[in-house]
């Protein structure tokens, strides 16, 4: 099943940490269009101090901002998130596609252990 990313020059990305408006990595989004903000279900967030981590969790939700990004910006985000498409085992985050009320969106999920890491209560990282 195609989710529509193969032939497009842009895709939608959900950000939930240092890439949000007002945070230190937001400038990496450049001229990307802010689509909307809101909660998405199916994820739980943890506080890694300098940035958060989210994982799949069917009964939880997190707050995200949705952006329409160009392919070049997506590559910059991949680098920031330590995502290596050809080496998923060693990636800090994995980029996955989910279906949301905004249509298909990409989101980065943490790919390392979160043992002894504190959960972000309420699912909204506001460091």
Image: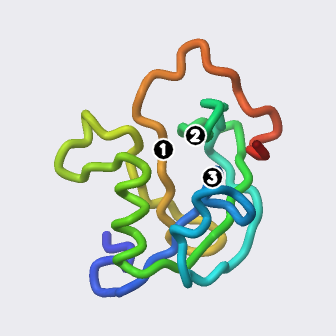
At a point 32% along the width and 74% down the height, the residue shown is 2
Furthest-top residue in this view = 116
Q: Measure the alpha-carbon separation of dots 3 and 2.
A: 13 Å
x then y, percent, for residue 61: 71, 45
- Residue 69 as seen in the image, left or right of residue 76: right
Here the colouring is: rainbow
Front label number (3 vs 1):
3
Q: What element carries label 2?
A: strand
Pointer 1 local density, CA inside 10 Å: few below 14, some 14–19, many at least 20: many
Question: Mark 3 or mark 1, which has the lower sequence index?
Answer: 3
Tell me the distance, in whole angstroms, between the alpha carbons under discs 3 and 1: 14 Å
Q: Position of residue 62 (x, y in %)?
A: 71, 47
Q: Image height check: is 18 above or below 35? A: above
Q: Judge left or right: residue 72 versus residue 84.
A: right
Q: Name the residue under label 3.
A: 18
Q: Check disc 3: other Cα within 10 Å, few if <14, some if 14-19, many if 20+.
A: some
The quadrant the C terminus occupies is top right
Residue 15 image point, x, y percent: 60, 59
10 Å crowding of disc 2: few (<14), some (14-19), many (20+):
many
Q: Mark 1 points at which residue?
A: 109
Of circles 3 and 2, the one toward us is 3
Residue at horizontal 42 percent and vertical 81 percent from the top: 70
Q: Which of 79 and 60 is in front in this view?
A: 79
Whether 65 is drawn above or below 96: the answer is below
Q: In which quarter of the image is residue 39?
A: bottom right
Residue contact between numbered discs 3 and 1, judged by CB atoms under 8 Å: no
- Taking the image as shown, residue 21 lies to the left or right of residue 96, namely right
Which label number is shown at residue 54?
Answer: 2
Do the residues under discs 3 and 2 have CB atoms within 8 angstroms?
Answer: no
How many tags in the picture?
Answer: 3
């Amino acid at each position: 099943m195609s989710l529509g990313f193969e032939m497009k020059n842009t895709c939608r990305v959900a950000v939930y940490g240092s890439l949000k408006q007002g945070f230190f990595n937001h400038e990496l989004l450049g001229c990307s269009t802010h689509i909307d903000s809101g909660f998405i279900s199916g994820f739980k967030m943890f506080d890694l101090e300098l940035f958060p981590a989210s994982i799949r969790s069917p009964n939880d939700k997190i707050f995200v901002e949705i952006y329409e990004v160009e392919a070049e910006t997506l590559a910059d985000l991949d680098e920031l998130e330590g995502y290596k498409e050809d080496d998923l085992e060693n990636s800090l985050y994995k980029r996955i596609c989910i279906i949301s009320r905004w249509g298909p969106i990409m989101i980065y999920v943490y790919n390392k252990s979160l043992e002894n890491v504190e959960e972000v209560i309420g699912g909204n990282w506001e460091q």
